[in-house]
Amino acid sequence: MGCAHDFDQVCRRFLTTVGPTLDHCVVLVCNVEQHWVVCLLRINAWEITLFDSLPSPDRVRQLEPLSRLIPYVIAKGGYFDAKSVAPRFDRMPVVSIPTDDELVQGDVHSCGVFACMYIERMIARDFPQSSSMSDVEEYRWKIALEIFAHTDEVTS
């Protein structure tokens, strides 16, 4: 991946549903109640955009601790000092992407694969906008191949 400016352009192209202000983004992969989701922290917009392949009405509530913690992490990391702006400590609201705009898994154990797919969307790799379970299986193999192709041989 290139510099942050390139990432900003990618976000604008692939994440048009989350709005135009994507100058400072952080991508988090979070495990919530044994389920993987992707959160895009949009610091300038002061919100967390949630990408969830198995939407639940409770998911936003489950991310409440994160939405309260992140402002303190941002402040501790020196972001506000570097930008010469007053720190903010109010919670970052969590905005869930509508189900129609998301890839939705067809089982209960593919959330990690879908999290990877969302991240690939964010960094401009190509993958289907809709998926069947056969697409998910193919994607699993693709991930495994990428992981193990760069692994040194282990000898005993």
Image: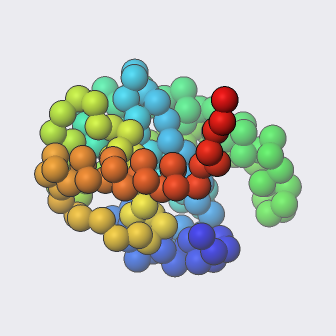
Instruction: Choose between 142 and 128: the one closer to the eye.
Output: 142
Q: What residue is rendered at 31% in x and 53% in y?
A: 139
Quadrant, the N terminus = bottom right
Q: Is residue 93 left or right of residue 77?
A: left
Q: What residue is rendered at 30% in x and 65% in y?
A: 127
Instruction: Choose between 152 and 136: the one closer to the eye.
Output: 152
**Total number of numbered discs in the rendering:** 0
Instruction: Please identify the residue farthest to the front as the structure is shown.
Output: 156
User: Where is residue 63 drawn, in percent x and y?
Assistant: 46, 31
Q: What residue is rendered at 33% in x and 47% in y?
A: 140
Q: Is residue 37 visible?
A: yes
Quadrant, the C terminus = top right
Q: Is residue 99 visible?
A: no
Q: Is residue 95 above or below residue 1?
A: above
Q: Is residue 66 left or right of residue 89?
A: left
Q: Which quadrant of the figure has residue 68?
A: top right
User: Where is residue 120 drawn, in percent x and y?
Assistant: 43, 61
Q: Which quadrant of the figure has residue 130?
A: bottom left
Q: Is residue 31 left or right of residue 150?
A: left
Q: Which quadrant of the figure has residue 12?
A: bottom left
Q: What residue is rendered at 81% in x and 41% in y?
A: 76
Q: Is residue 46 above or below residue 89?
A: below
User: Where is residue 94 drawn, in percent x and y?
Assistant: 44, 42
Q: Is residue 28 above or below residue 66?
A: below
Instruction: Choose between 81 and 125: the one closer to the eye.
Output: 125
